[in-house]
Image (cartoon, coloured by chain):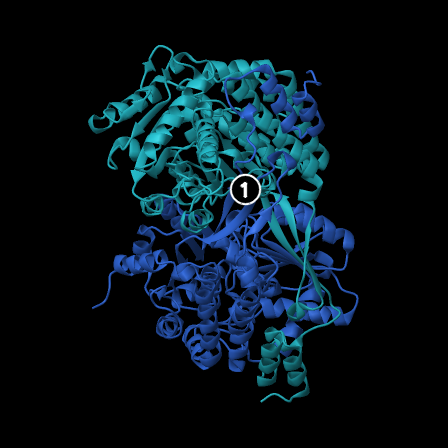
Amino acid sequence: MAAAACSFEATETMKELREAFESGKTRSVEWRRSQLKALLKMAEFHENDILDALRSDLSKPELESLLQEIGMMRASCKVALKELARWMAPEKVNTTMATFPSSGEIVPEPLGVVLVISAWNYPFMLSLDPLIGAIAAGNAVVLKPSEISPATSSVLAKLLGQYMDCSAVKVIEGGVPETTLLLEQKWDKIFYTGNGRVGRIVMAAAAKHLTPVVLELGGKSPVIVDSNTNLKVMEEITCIYFLKVTVRRIIAGKWGCNSGQACVSPDYVITTKKFAPELVHALKSELEIFYGKDPVTSVDLSRIVNSNHFQRLSKLLEEDKVSSKIVYGGQKDINNLKIAPTILLDVPDDSLIMNEEIFGPLLPIITVDKVEDSFKILKPKEKPLAAYLFTNDKKLKEDFISNVSAGGLVVNDTTMHLAEHSLPFGGVGESGIGAYHGKFSFDAFSHKKAVLLRSFAADLTARYPPYTPQKQKFLKALLSGSLLAILRALLGWDK
Amino acid sequence: MKKSLEEEWGELRETFNSGKTNEQSWRRSQLKGLLNLLKEKEEDIFEALEKDLGKHKVEAYRDEVGPLIKSVNYILENLKQWMSSKQAKLPLAAFPSKAELVPEPLGVVLVLSSWNFPFGLSLEPVIGAIAAGNAVVLKPSELSPASSAVLADLIPKYLDNKAIKVIEGGSSVGEQLLELKWDKILFTGSAKVGRIVMSAAVKHLTPVVLELGGKCPTIVDSFSSSRDKEIALNRILSAKFGACAGQACIGVDYIITEKKYAATLVELLKNTLLSMFGENPKETRNISRIINEKNFFRLKSLLDEQSVKDSIVQGGSFDEANLFVEPTILLDPPLDATIMTEEIFGPLLPIITVEKIEDSIQFIKSRPKPLAIYAFTKNEAFKKRLQSETTSGSIVFNDTIIQYAVDTLPFGGVGESGMGRYHGKFSFDTFSHEKVVARRSFLTDFWFRYPPWTEQKLQLFRLVYVFNYLGIVLNLLGLKRS
């Protein structure tokens, strides 16, 4: 029954979108600008509706919603509006002697009709950021928000329906059946944010239609914390200051990002055995300053999104060899789906918590003898979306950059690289395929067409049959790019 | 004892993990090794192409060896610059942070090549993979066995065989290779196999570049100048019959021209054919063979239908013993015949006529996106419309195929004709991961980043996000209210 209703919607939807795209309207600058401006208006006038939805779905603290979701979305929109003309402009390229006379350029074009499948943790931002890219690039687009954040999904459907050109920008709500049906259609690109398991399902469906994909996945983003005891100047005071800042930034990236339910949240920490107690102590004191003595009741922390994930995270803590390693936190409130910021020390490598992306407010700390040993630990693991290092040691920084592969690396902070629109945001290996943000969003949804303009002014007869040894000599010289060689071939001085 | 595929793969992983392929000196030495191979073993390459395809050595040089040498030199010239990190511009609000984009190799990559340009389409991707610092497996096509054997023999002699391996074999070897974990796969071939490759890549979330094909239309507008005519015809015919006998992904598949010009065009084509290949094209040995019997009979069957047969205006003969197909021209075969719905990949050239030349735009748009569109015209308005209203991997005005040799233009398809691109720096990029590295200082720390949250912190953030620096200062001084 439900399937039949879906069927109808999917094929009719595709037809309408294709017609809208073929009409050429989404290609015009005016249309793109009007849609982007409409998004800005929507975010401005309906801020409260959006905040309510995020509160309902995640109990997300208002400041996080305003900054990380609405604020970032508005910044993204503004950048697109500001840069659109520049992004759309063809790029001239140099051509060489081999094709003289000619001129070449690379021209961005929309791909056509694209699909954006969003996630539940930043349901507003992760829906609209790719949408902004798709529209800026001139495509017609379907957005499928996550059903796990139903209030936001509903608000997006309602608001986009009101503010956008519905013949070319649509929201289709639903769960697995709707998504499956959408994935059966022929898209010109699919942009998916979520986990590796579903990412594979998306890519497999895309393969049937030779649809290119962007997969923004996740992984276990490690934070390596150096003790910084090799500082010479003002040693003790500086060390304390650095430790304080380090710990604040880790907390902000972990619990300050949706209670750790973020793809780039620090997943676990690696530090030296010697330094671990100091680090744990510093974390505890800052956590208390941030969230009070009873963090489970703090309004400045998101809740766990649903009972499935709550059970999942509880299981991670309950594993025998893990539960004894809790050094802070561990409190749970099942009625409000809250789990307190929890720190664990030296959990075994084969524990569940160290073998799946945590995506929650649990922070294991792994210890090593020397901080350099961290790289050996990371090497055999899958490439994460992000990796972080806190240190003042120049060599350690350089070793980190050359030895650790991830979507992005940050030295002395966490997660802030997402806010920079001039930096591509995406994974590598298990953490994903492709990237976006800023111009990278525009590029992700464009085809860069090569254009070559040749004239009849000069013609290289050596290219054509009948083939002769002289022609071969000349072609050789021409392709070598050497003017001298060309002259010699022309004059017949070649051997 | 011969190693298993897993063992070969394992050796490549080890080599890559050792960091050797990441060194610029290693990359340069390998690229220079390839240059030596191409220069010293030219004759071996020509001989193999002659065996596999009856390809004339001038064609072989023009289309395979020459462009490869050009590509290697281009990369050697630019490698240092491409390998260096790029500073990213950050706004003042992010001060004092710095960010850069650092290219790194992906790891161990797989190149699956094709039979029509067995050297070019094998080594062009391999060049890119090496330049980007990866370890590589090349699987040449088994349908061009002489070329495959030469590659398998020469590559280990000229290149580091702990990092670059040639694995020969057919589809079963291909399937086995696709089971392994690659950090990227570049495939050149048909859309059908492209789907299989991408589906296999799903297992390990391997990103892919698929260089596929399609029907590349060639629009021919009427010409006033006879010189222009001659040049246009040379370029069209050499891109059909002179490019592996039409067995080329960016070759001319079919022509579109105005009804009123068709008769003239047919005559011009016939004359140019004659001057290029003489009365007896087979004797000139300037046209390649069809690769094998399967494709020979496939081409033959394209002319089976009576209505298609009736549209032949030139050629139409088939020499099974020599796998030679005579250059054949057809005028307006039915649009639903196989010859007009599938990529021809052979020396059969249909001419489709339209009322006005502008009608070609809708004709092309209603069909799958091709790898290339060629248009011979001096009509500026038409050029503009064609370029903006159609989409294709590339579009070339007044020439054919030559975009392949331009290092600064990306080479790749869109839709059914493929995904991803390479050549020049695009090769380097396609085999690299552009890693973001952001550095922050401990010197300043925006205390308003952290909970507990207050109204003032919110205000400050609102100002930061719109880069209102004055507002930030005023707020901090207590002078600004919301």
Q: Secondary structure at mark 1?
A: loop
| A186 on left or right of B321 | right
Q: Which quadrant is home to the C terminus of chain A?
A: bottom right
Compared to residue B373, the image places residue B158 above or below, namely: below
Task: Decide which of B45, B382 is in the foreground and name it.
Answer: B45
Q: Residue at x 54, y 48 (%)?
A: B101
Q: Residue at x 46, y 15 (%)?
A: A59
**Label 1 CA crowd tier, 10 Å (few <14, some 14–19, many 20+):** many
Q: Quadrant of residue B280?
A: bottom right
Q: Position of residue B132 (x, y in %)?
A: 47, 58
The chain letter corresponding to blue is B
| A297 on left or right of A101 | left
Residue B319 in view here = no
Q: Which quadrant is home to the N terminus of chain A?
A: top left
Q: Position of residue B438 (x, y in %)?
A: 52, 42
Q: Which residue is mark 1?
A: A424
